Amino acid sequence: MPKLDSTHLVDRIKRRLDELSAGASVASRDLRAVLTDQQNAQLEKNWTEQKALKAKHRPKSAEQRAALGWKTKRDLYIEALESALGLAQSEQLEAFESKLRRAEVRRAKIFLEAFSSAADKGKEPHACIAAANNDLARAGLQGLNVNRGDPIHTPPKQMQSTHTRTDDDPRSSPDEHE
C-alpha cells in the first residue's frame, strides 16, 4: 500500500466526515489520524468543556440542550473534521506543488548521477542520455526528452536532413494557404 501524504488528506477527511454524518461508527484513532496535533488538542479542550457543562446542567428537552450548547462527541468530531477539511483544502495546492517539486528533484538527481556515471566510463553523449533514461525508467519515472538542438546531443548523420527548401520547392509553407 502506498504511503499516504498530505495530498490524500482531503479525501480521507471527506470519507470520515461522510461516515460520521451518515451515523456510522468510526474509530477514534481513525478520526484523530486525519487531524493535526493542534486540532486534536482543540477537540480535547472542547470535550472537556462539554463534560463540565453536562455536569452542571441537566436539561430535559432537546431545545434546552441546544440553548445551553450541549454537543455529543460525534458533533464535536464533525465540527473538528469540517474545520480540518477547510484547512486541508486551502493547503492542497501547496501540497501538490511540494510533491511535484520533490519528484522533479529526485528525477534530476537520478538523471544526473546516471549521466555522469556513463560519461565517466567514456560513453558518447547519446549513450549517456539513454543510460540516464534507463535509470529513470527503473525508478518508475518518465525519461527526459533531450531536444535535438541541445548542445549535449548530436544526432547521427542519417538523421540529418539533406534537403534544403528553396523558393521553387513544390511543397508550400503553411503561411501560403492563408
Image: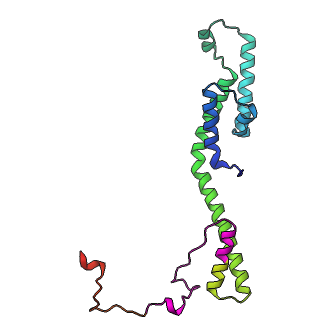
Depth check, front residue: 99 or 126:
126
Magenta residues span 132-161
Instruction: Identify the residue at image location x=74%, y=11%.
Output: 56
Question: In the figure, is residue 147 to the left or right of 65?
Answer: left
Q: Position of residue 117 (x, y in %)?
A: 73, 81
Depth check, front residue: 138 or 79:
138
Q: Is residue 103 above or below residue 25?
A: below
Q: Quadrant of residue 88?
A: top right
Instruction: Label the magenta part by its dominant secondary structure.
Output: loop
Q: Quadrant of residue 169?
A: bottom left
Instruction: Identify the residue at image location x=66%, y=48%.
Output: 6
Q: Is residue 54 above or below residue 34?
A: above
- Magenta-span inclusion, residue 157: yes
Q: Quadrant of residue 31?
A: top right
Please, which colouring scheme is shown? rainbow
Q: Position of residue 22 (x, y in %)?
A: 60, 26
Residue reaching furthest top?
A: 60
Q: Position of residue 149 (x, y in %)?
A: 51, 83
- Magenta-span inclusion, residue 67: no
Question: In the figure, is residue 52 to the left or right of 159?
Answer: right
| Quadrant for the C terminus in the image | bottom left
Q: Position of residue 49 (x, y in %)?
A: 72, 21
Q: Is residue 169 above or below residue 66?
A: below
